[in-house]
């Protein structure tokens, strides 16, 4: 709801002139702060422990950076006649992004999956995305993406260096971070809203919204829903075929099917020209909303099923009438 409200605010009161310049500088700052906090949150010990489950993490990374981009190429080709080239490229761009961190972990926990593995998998995906996403974008998007010396320097300065600084500073601020999680959540969400407002303000000032009709938005939503359904089905099937236990299967489905708005918006702001940015990130914003709604339903249902199974197991392990009743 906050994202939709921010889009509405940018449509009615877009930043112009000096305000737009100040907003641009503020956006650069909050993006760096966001990735600094990502680095500070990732415990090196937890990351090392997570490497032990390398098979699970390899499949999740393959879902994020191999399966998704392949589906994205197909979706771009199929949707371009309906959506137009800009929105179709936006669909392809969202498939190149890393997995989410907070929602992947939250859904895994709600569905009673392997939370520790989810923490590691989501963190690995975000870290890999700093390098992999721009590299993939330069290959599959060609001239639409701005990957030159200045873009690489911007990505390094805004994303990679703050992440490394957060890892270095973790030894001094880890306790403070653990004690101020609500504040950090506010920073996470606030940074996303600021980038959304900046991107859509530029789009409104440039007049790009006159080219987006209601029918195209509906077609875009269907395209995003189809992408999510395909990846959920593929990860569910792969987790069963590869013989993962139920907790790891839950982790694979939720971490392998997400795309990060928090990482994607800053990357798009660096990689794409300002007047194209709002259309390029619109598919990502829609996909983000759809994945949250769908995965909330799935996580709650799987969590109830797991809780019911544990209760039956507990009763069944007791002798006498209770065992017979449970069997009945």
Image: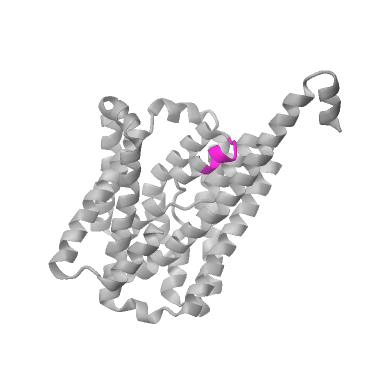
From this view, report whether residue 147 is shown above or below residue 263: below
Residue 56 included in the magenta stretch of the image: no
In x, y percent, where is residue 41? Answer: 36, 34
Residue 264 lies left or right of residue 31; in this view the side is: right
Badge count: 0
In x, y percent, where is residue 177? Answer: 31, 32
**Residue at the (23%, 53%) spot, across then down:** 28
**Residue 275 seen in the figure:** no
From this view, report whether residue 209 is shown above or below residue 318: below
**Residue at the (56%, 69%) spot, across then down:** 222
In x, y percent, where is residue 274? Answer: 27, 68
Residue at the extreme top: 319
In x, y percent, where is residue 75? Answer: 54, 67
Q: Give the range drawn in magenta.
A: 107-113
Residue 48 lies left or right of residue 230; in this view the side is: left
> Which quadrant is home to the N terminus?
bottom left
**Residue at the (47%, 78%) spot, across then down:** 214
> Which quadrant is home to the C terminus?
top right
Front-lying residue, 78 or 100: 100
Front-lying residue, 286 or 63: 286
**Residue 155 seen in the figure:** yes
Residue 246 lies left or right of residue 281; in this view the side is: right
**Residue at the (55%, 68%) spot, across then down:** 223
| Quadrant assignment, res 182 | top left
From this view, report whether residue 168 is shown above or below residue 74: above
Q: What colouring method underlies this structural image? A: one colour
Residue 299 lies left or right of residue 189; in this view the side is: right
């Amino acid at each position: 709801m906050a994202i939709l409200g921010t889009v509405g605010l940018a449509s009615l009161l877009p930043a112009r002139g000096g305000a737009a310049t100040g907003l641009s500088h503020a956006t650069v700052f909050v993006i760096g702060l966001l990735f600094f906090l990502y680095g500070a949150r990732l415990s090196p010990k937890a990351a090392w422990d997570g490497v032990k489950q390398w098979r699970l993490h390899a499949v999740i990374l393959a879902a994020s950076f191999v399966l998704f981009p392949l589906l994205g190429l197909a979706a771009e080709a199929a949707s371009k006649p309906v959506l137009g080239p800009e929105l179709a490229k936006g669909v392809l761009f969202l498939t190149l992004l890393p997995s989410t961190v907070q929602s992947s972990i939250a859904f895994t926990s709600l569905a009673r999956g392997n939370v520790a593995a989810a923490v590691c998998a989501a963190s690995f995906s975000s870290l890999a995305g700093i390098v992999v996403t721009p590299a993939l974008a330069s290959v599959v998007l060609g001239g639409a993406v701005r990957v030159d010396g200045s873009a690489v320097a911007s990505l390094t300065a805004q994303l990679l260096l703050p992440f490394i600084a957060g890892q270095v500073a973790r030894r001094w601020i880890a306790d403070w971070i653990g004690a101020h999680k609500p504040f950090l959540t506010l920073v996470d969400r606030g940074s996303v809203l600021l980038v959304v407002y900046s991107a859509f303000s530029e789009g409104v000032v440039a007049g790009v919204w006159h080219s987006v009709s209601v029918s195209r938005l509906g077609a875009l939503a269907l395209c995003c829903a189809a992408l999510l359904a395909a990846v959920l089905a593929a990860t569910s099937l792969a987790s069963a075929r590869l013989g993962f236990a139920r907790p790891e299967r839950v982790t694979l489905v939720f971490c392998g099917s997400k795309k990060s708005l928090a990482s994607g918006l800053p990357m798009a702001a660096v990689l794409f020209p300002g007047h194209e940015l709002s259309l390029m990130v619109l598919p990502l914003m829609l996909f983000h909303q759809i994945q949250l709604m769908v995965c909330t339903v799935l996580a709650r249902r799987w969590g109830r099923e797991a809780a019911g199974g544990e209760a039956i197991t507990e009763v069944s392990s007791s002798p006498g009438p209770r065992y017979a009743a449970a069997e009945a």
